[in-house]
Amino acid sequence: MWLQVSLFSLSGLLLSIQTQAQDQASLHRSGPNDPSGHCHYTFTVASPQESSCPGSNREMDGVLSRLTLLEALVSRLLAGVDKGTMTGVGANREEGLQEAYSQVTGERNQLQQDKERLNRQIQELQRRLAELSQEAESLRQKPCQQTLTSVGTQHENRPANDPAYDFGNSGYQEMKAEVTEISASHVFHEGSHNFTGCGELVSVGDPVSHRKSDSITGKYGVWMQDPEPQGPQYTNNTVWRIDAVRRDVRHLFAYEDMDQFSRGFPMKVLVLPEPVESTGATVYRGSLYYQRRRSRTLIRYDLASEYLASRMDLPHAGFHGQHPYSWGGYTDIDLAVDEQGLWAIYSTTKARGAIVISQLNPESLEVKKTWETNIKKNTVANAFMVCGRLYTVASYTVPNTTINFAFDTATGVGQAVSVPFKNKYSYNSMVDYNHAQRKLYAWDNFHMVTYDIRLGRASHGRS
């Protein structure tokens, strides 16, 4: 402890000496060293008349040398004391420093590896860029050769501003095709179901949003386009929409095309003679088909003449919450259209809640044939028909769900399937198929969306 104090004293002495030297002070020894070994010094500040202190610099240099040597000896002694006594805190501090050093070293090595990897990637990209540049330069130097002899004869009859003259004088060929639009009604005829484009559902694309409802009445509903329109008044471009959140749903909105539908500008609003039940309506061959509220009665409403064309009770069908889909909404009877005509998807007491499929006469609404499946209607979220096959959607809320069941009316066989399906807005209350557009139409939590679909191998000779 005395050594440490002496070290501080000597350090202070050194500072005093340096300060006095700067002020042109003189250092004098006052007497001989005493037996204790201590040295005594006297400092004399120069007077204003004295410009320097002769002889003081040599003595100060000697003191500084001895003081430096003493400080070194004391430091070595203190280092030995610390190693012998401070085994606790010193050891922990050394261990912490060693750990921090190791961590920094590891991070430095990782950064060095990342730098080397990025350098390699940059070199590879530069190499590929050089190759592409060489290839582009080679292509620029090669003249385009005309391979089609017919083009030269066509140039003679073309005007000077024809695009063929603006393509580097190369073998440019303008391709044109004439397309004739044919109504789907001329392609699909009732009773003839050998449509070669039919097949099993392979995939469903991502949903494309076309419109968002701006009021609570549009939380769920039904919207569609007629795959086989009749007459010039309404075409396959006409969009139909019904908001289903009301006690008395009677308004049918007609839009000229998809653009006007997206803008929210209806060209006409029809008031239906009977109220609509839920989201099971569909449009087919110039008529709206729907279930009358709180009944098993089906109605065909002629869109051109705006009158109730026919009505018929669906035998034994549950209604108003007896056998709905899993999301509820009184979706007991769901009407659907595909390449083979008009269908009803529902259930009965006899079927104990399992899905029943009936093919209907589109004029009279009479049942032509019925199939009973083995999948409960209230365990699936929605269902639709494609090429005479029933497909069910597993969930109406799960963003990434599946089409989980298929039933083929041609064979009477049902099977589990797994086709990915997305509920983008997490409340899908309606899914219908349009065979002319080859799309699914859906109403998902205020949003009206479509899905592109892909079918597999064609099936022939279906009844």
Image (cartoon, rainbow, N blue to C red):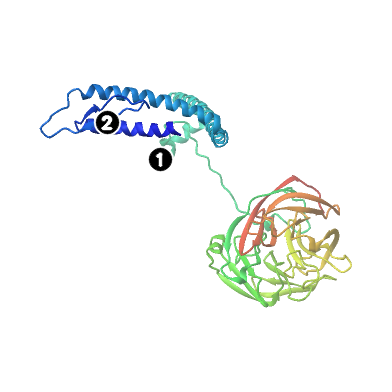
Residue type, label 1: Pro
Along the viewing direction, whichever of 242 and 55 lies nearer the viewer: 55
Q: Position of residue 347 (x, y in %)?
A: 83, 66
Horizontally, is 8 left or right of 412 in the view? left
Q: Which quarter of the image is occupied by the C terminus? A: bottom right
Residue 240 in view here: yes
Along the viewing direction, whichever of 333 and 239 lies nearer the viewer: 333
Q: Which residue is mark 1?
A: 159
Horizontally, is 227 left or right of 405 in the view? left
Residue type, label 2: Ile
- Quarter of image, res 88: top right
Nearer to us: label 1 or label 2: 2
Q: Which residue is mark 2?
A: 17
Horizontally, is 371 left or right of 152 in the view? right
How many C-alpha atoms fall within 10 Å of the one at disc 2: few (<14), some, or many (≥20)?
many
- Quarter of image, res 281: bottom right
How many C-alpha atoms fall within 10 Å of the one at disc 1: few (<14), some, or many (≥20)?
few
Q: Position of residue 76 (x, y in %)?
A: 46, 25
Closer to the chain start, of discs 1 and 2, is 2
